[in-house]
């Protein structure tokens, strides 16, 4: 499973990329606004840090505008993935950009049919927002399972499932059990993944016992 970071904070991306565990980045207009940075500059900076896919979202709402913005964004770096909203205009832009061999991430997916039609449009990634579905009393993880089943039925659908709007460790583990291709993690969730109370407790005990042996490995 690929791990993307869901943030536009360059310092955080730099810091966490040093773990060697980050495969790509996703951004959206809200995350860029939160960063307080210029969008193009942020993308240029991220591209100097990360070799993997970097999702950059268009803000036009018409097909032609989305295509033009997508072409502009894709020129920033070879690993830019153009993020398009799941609207009819977005799907048409997805077909056009896919025909130009530009990678796409169709975002704001909340149903199986949306995921199916985005795959039909040739999307490189589909981004189902699972936390926001949970927020309205539905199950985001059920949607991931359904999309996985649908895509598995058809060899021609090569769209990758990019689980987005992740809020918890359970979201991550269950998405991996289902077999989602990629998860985009808020930095806080990424930092919680390796932790377990018993790991810390066990290590403390090992180190205490080792100190009593007065040995050294090197
Ligand atoms: O990748 C999409 C994500 O940023 C949305 O997350 O928590 O705003 O629903 P959230």
Image: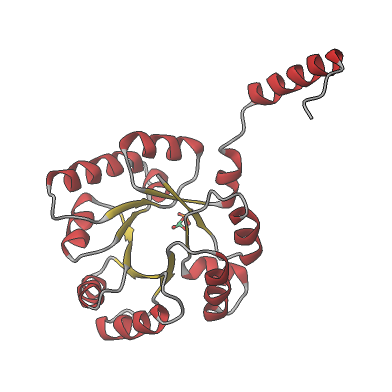
**Does residue 14 appear left or right of residue 158 in this picture?**
right
Q: Residue furthest front?
A: 218
Q: Nearer the viewer, residue 93 or 4?
A: 4
User: Which x, y percent locates residue 73?
Assistant: 41, 79
User: Which x, y percent locates residue 130?
Assistant: 38, 47
- The residue positioned 35% from the left and 83% from the top of the image is 71
Question: Colour mode?
Answer: secondary structure
Give the total of numbered labels: 0
Q: Quadrant of residue 35?
A: bottom right
**Quarter placement of the N terminus:** top left
Q: Nearer the viewer, residue 217 or 55?
A: 217
Query: Please, is residue 67 above or below residue 8 in the view?
Result: below
User: Which x, y percent locates residue 124?
Assistant: 28, 62
**Does residue 20 appear left or right of residue 138 in this picture?**
right
**Does residue 70 appear left or right of residue 115 in this picture?**
right
Query: Please, is residue 73 above or below residue 148 in the view?
Result: below
- The residue positioned 26% from the left and 76% from the top of the image is 97
**Quarter placement of the C terminus:** top right
- The residue positioned 33% from the left and 86% from the top of the image is 68
Q: Quadrant of residue 209?
A: top right
Q: Nearer the viewer, residue 201 or 117?
A: 201
Q: Nearer the viewer, residue 48 or 187?
A: 48
**Does residue 66 appear left or right of residue 50 in this picture?**
left
- The residue positioned 19% from the left and 48% from the top of the image is 151
User: Which x, y percent locates residue 170?
Assistant: 46, 35
């Amino acid at each position: 499973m690929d791990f993307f970071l869901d943030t536009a904070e360059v310092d955080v991306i730099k810091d966490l990329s040093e773990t060697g565990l980050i495969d790509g980045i996703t951004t959206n207009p809200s995350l860029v606004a939160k960063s307080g940075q210029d969008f193009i500059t942020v993308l240029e900076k991220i591209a100097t840090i990360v070799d993997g896919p970097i999702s950059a979202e268009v803000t036009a709402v018409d097909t032609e505008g989305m295509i033009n913005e997508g072409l502009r964004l894709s020129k920033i770096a070879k690993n830019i993935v153009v993020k398009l909203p799941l609207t009819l205009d977005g799907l048409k832009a997805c077909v056009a950009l896919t025909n130009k061999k530009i990678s796409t991430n169709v975002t704001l997916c909340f149903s199986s049919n949306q995921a199916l039609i985005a795959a039909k449009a040739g999307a490189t990634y589909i981004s189902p927002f699972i936390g926001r579905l949970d927020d309205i009393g539905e199950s985001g993880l059920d949607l991931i399972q359904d999309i996985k089943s649908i895509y598995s039925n058809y060899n021609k659908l090569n769209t990758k499932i990019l689980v987005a709007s992740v809020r918890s460790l359970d979201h991550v583990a269950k998405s991996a059990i289902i077999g989602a291709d990629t998860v985009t993690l808020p930095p806080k969730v990424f930092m919680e993944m390796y932790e377990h109370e018993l790991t810390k407790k066990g290590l403390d005990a090992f180190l205490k016992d080792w100190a009593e042996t007065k040995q050294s490995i090197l």
